[in-house]
Amino acid sequence: MKIVDAKVIVTCPGRNFVTVKIMTDQGIYGIGDATLNGREKSVVSYLEDYLLPMLIGRDPQQIEDIWQYFYRGVYWRRGPIGMTAIAGIDVALWDIKAKLANMPLYQLLGGRSRDRILVYSHANGKDLDSTLDAVRKAKEKGYKAVRIQCGVPGIAKMYGIAKSNKAYEPADSDLPMEESWSSEKYMKFIPEVFDAVRKEFGYDIHLLHDVHHRLTPIEAARVGKDLEPYRLFWMEDPVPAENQESFKLIRQHTTTPLAVGEVFNSIHDCRELIQNQMIDYIRTTIVHAGGITQLRRIADFASLYNVRTGFHGATDLSPVCMGAALHFDYWVPNFGIQEHMAHSPQMEEVFTRAYEFNDGYFTPGEKIGHGVDIDEKLAAKYPYKRACLPVNRLEDGTLWHW
Ligand code: GCO
Ligand code: MG
């Protein structure tokens, strides 16, 4: 069997998505997500100018060797652009292999380890009332786990809060918009938010929260401690993870579970945090970390330390990534939870999917392969539009972590 053609499809049905499509001499094809929010074209160039030409003529069944060729065989290893490009190819190859085997992808991975996949939704509001309202709506839709983000009094525009009538964080500005931040105001307010949520909804719902890398280690330790009475499922990205020593300090002070890793792209980024048991959930995703081939290794390594998976699943990860992730979640023994933010109907017209939501849980579907496909004609109607994520400044103008 041979790869006869490989291409990249870029489409913007409301936001930009990059999809790799690999064709074989037997008529079977596979697709993979290679979207890197706000830096899409760099991945497209890496694929078109370098990786895809090297694929032609290879046997698509040799997923491992192709992965090693693009990772080990390249002097410049790792990094979000290269690893996202490898992921796009890797998932397309797994899709082909599952189709060849005439199986849904999860069967090829080892079969399912659970009946259904717990996902968390988002509830965000500009103030407490609208946040409580959003939790109510998520519950009505059946979600059993909800991530809470709430505007902080005195902070004008901040991470995680929707503009009216829009999904939060639309990444729709041609050049980055600016947001603002005050750790002091946030730290004072956030326990009040969780107090109000638990008072109204009780403890029979999982609550999560994303700090989005904004605190110092001792501040994160304080927030973790203050949130302990509200029994969070997790506190995410409390500090930037470049200096992983920081997590020792946070861990010494709080039993609030920690989730980290959505910006990681290599098993080496995850190793220290996992092996020192400084986190509880690893969020590294298929699309940003070199595909299923590397993520399997990360998940197996994590299982040795009781660290469970909790993959990133915001809308900037395409339905192709979501489909592949759900097959992975169905199989992976140390599964924790999966993030879910619904794609718009327009996006779901371009990407057809086999996965299904039912009462707070997903199943990946029984279609062979990963079950997600792209309508290329429709995709062509939505040309790429540059869209940047915001940047963030402290109140005195200092550039801060976003
Ligand atoms: C999350 C993430 C997202 C990211 C976004 C960046 O936990 O879902 O933090 O909100 O910011 O996916 O592209
Ligand atoms: Mg996050």
Image (cartoon, rainbow, N blue to C red):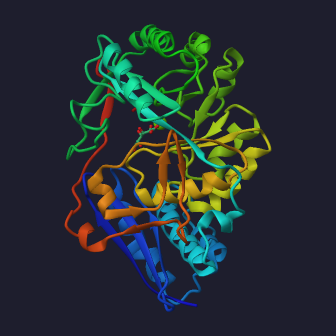
Tell me what residue is drawn at x 32 percent, y 14 percent.
129
Q: Residue 48 versus residue 7: which sits nearer the camera?
A: 7
Q: Position of residue 328 (x, y in %)?
A: 61, 56
Above or below residue 37? Residue 185 is: above
Q: How many labels does the image show?
A: 0
Q: Residue 18 versus residue 370: which sits nearer the camera?
A: 370
Can residue 359 be seen here? The reply is yes
Tell me what residue is drawn at x 49 percent, y 16 percent.
201
In this picture, residue 220 sits left or right of residue 277: left
Tell me what residue is drawn at x 35 percent, y 29 percent.
159
Above or below residue 30? Residue 18 is: above
Can residue 400 be seen here? The reply is no
Which quarter of the figure is the C terminus placed in?
top left
Task: Using the rendered view, name the quadrant where residue 78 is placed.
Answer: bottom right
Q: Residue 39 versus residue 279: which sits nearer the camera?
A: 279
Q: Where is residue 194 in the image (x, y as percent from the top left)?
A: 49, 14
Q: Where is residue 291 in the image (x, y as percent from the top left)?
A: 56, 61
Which quarter of the figure is the N terminus placed in?
bottom right
Q: Where is residue 225 in the image (x, y as percent from the top left)?
A: 61, 12
In this picture, residue 203 sits left or right of residue 287: right
Q: Residue 219 versus residue 331: which sits nearer the camera?
A: 331
